[in-house]
Amino acid sequence: MTTIQLDQTVPDFELPSTSDTIFKLSDYKGKNVVIYFYPKDSTPGCTLEGQNFRDNIAEFEAHNTIIVGISRDSIRKHENFKAKQAFPFELLSDEDESACGLFDVLHLKKNYGREYMGIVRSTFLIDKDGVLRQEWRKVKVKEHLAEVLEAVKAL
């Protein structure tokens, strides 16, 4: 499978989404798209990251930008997480890891001596023409939102 590269068109993909919809990237041509990959619903870092996007959604929308979050959690778990946190954006379920592969965010991780394949927190900014303009890998949640917003404003 090919992984995406900066300044190249992102191949179209679709995933099941909250709100009983299917997200298809090509449906958002004409808008900037921020895709953030996160390890797991309802964990501290992932909750804070989603809250940061939620709390600044008006600024993203003012710059013709939508936000979507992706993890390997099920739609049911996503619906609960989205409702509890009042996220005004959709969460996509990548249980088959197709988008994770496309964006190369699944890597070997270690936790308490156990090794496993997990999502490395990463964010991607796709412009209104479907071209990948910016990527952030191994994201640190605290300073991340300001960097993404700055990049969106620069488009």
Image: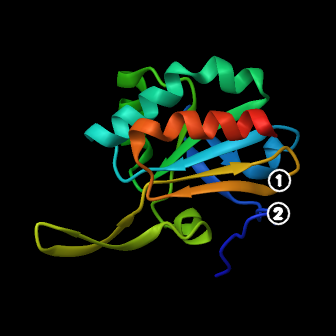
User: Can see residue 42?
Assistant: no
Spot occupied by residue 88 in the image (x, y as percentages of width and height)? 55, 23
Q: Left or right of 144: which side holds 8? A: right
* Tag 2–tag 1 contact (CB < 8 Å): yes
Q: Which of marks 2 and 1 is nearer the N terminus?
A: 2
Q: Judging from the image, what secondary structure is the residue with disc 2 in?
A: loop
Residue topped by disc 2: 9
Spot occupied by residue 139 in the image (x, y as percentages of width and height)? 45, 52
Occupied quadrant, residue 48: top left
Q: Which residue is drawn at 88% across and 39% down?
A: 30
Q: Which mark is drawn over residue 28?
A: none
Q: Which mark is drawn over residue 130?
A: 1
Q: Left or right of 147: which side holds 109? A: left
Up the image or down, 7 lies above or below 139; here it is below
Q: Residue at x 35, y 34 (%)?
A: 47
Q: Which amino acid does label 2 sit on?
A: Thr
Q: Left or right of 46: which side holds 14? A: right
